[in-house]
Image: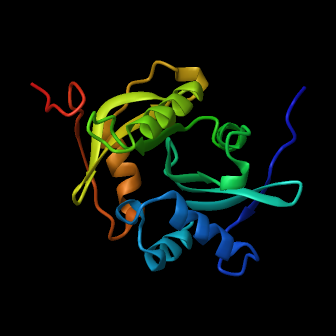
Amino acid sequence: MSMRRLEEKPVTRQLPEAEQVMRLYAEAFPDEERIPESELWQMACREQVEFTAYYDVGTFCGFTFCIDAGCYLYIVYLAVDAQARAKGYGSRVLAQLRERHPHATFVLEIEPLDEDAPNLHQRIKRLAFYERNGFTETGYDLYDEAMRYTVLHAPPAESASQAFDAQAFKEAVGVQMGDYHFELRPARTRRGQEPA
């Protein structure tokens, strides 16, 4: 039995659920992982940015904030409302993104699996979710200011073995990031260790 498509609406300040979207944004991502709200709204006005709310039978269930850089779709944020978690909505959102961007390599980052992280169990679950949805580690970490993240990617189906090109990705999405700057470095070889 196929799943019903989730309704999609562009997130703007005029969207009736805009406040709900921003509340979920604040709940789902800690301060250090969030782009300041004013900058987020500025970025959302750019043609290449997709800020989308998802609904199931009229009920808000989550949002994505993505940069469409042609060959790459950078999923900056994906969040599912607390009432809708563990019901398959995250996978459905990713499937709908894949329908819209069938030829793009999807890229996102997650918190690294550092052994001493207080939320290690949550990080492991997040990685498992993305792996179930076709993502693999790229071999790169993303650094922004004081934070480090593990970069994952999911190439399009027709080129499933495609290697991740860090320089091409940075060039493709960097111009859309405004004042937000990041760098990519080869990933640590084992949890918490620098590469040899």
Tell which residue pokes out farthest to the left in this image. Answer: 196
196 vs 97, left or right, is left
Residue 179 to residue 51: above or below? below
142 vs 192, left or right, is right
Tell which residue pokes out farthest to the top in this image. Answer: 161
Where on the picture, by quarter, is residue 25?
bottom right
Residue at figure coordinates x 42%, y 61% from the top left: 30
Q: Looking at the figure, which quarter contains the C terminus?
A: top left
Residue 21 to residue 5: above or below? below
Residue at figure coordinates x 87%, y 30% from the top left: 2
Q: Picture coordinates of residue 114 (x, y %)?
A: 28, 36
Residue at figure coordinates x 20%, y 34% from the top left: 192
- Please state the total of marks drawn on the protein image: 0
Q: Picture coordinates of residue 102 (x, y %)?
A: 64, 35
Q: Looking at the figure, which quarter contains the N terminus?
A: top right
Q: Picture coordinates of residue 116 (x, y %)?
A: 26, 38
Instruction: Identify the colour scheme used.
Output: rainbow
Residue 48 versus residue 154: which sits nearer the camera?
154
Q: Picture coordinates of residue 178 (x, y %)?
A: 37, 69
89 vs 75, left or right, is right
Residue 94 versus residue 22: which sits nearer the camera?
22
Residue 196 to residue 12: above or below? above
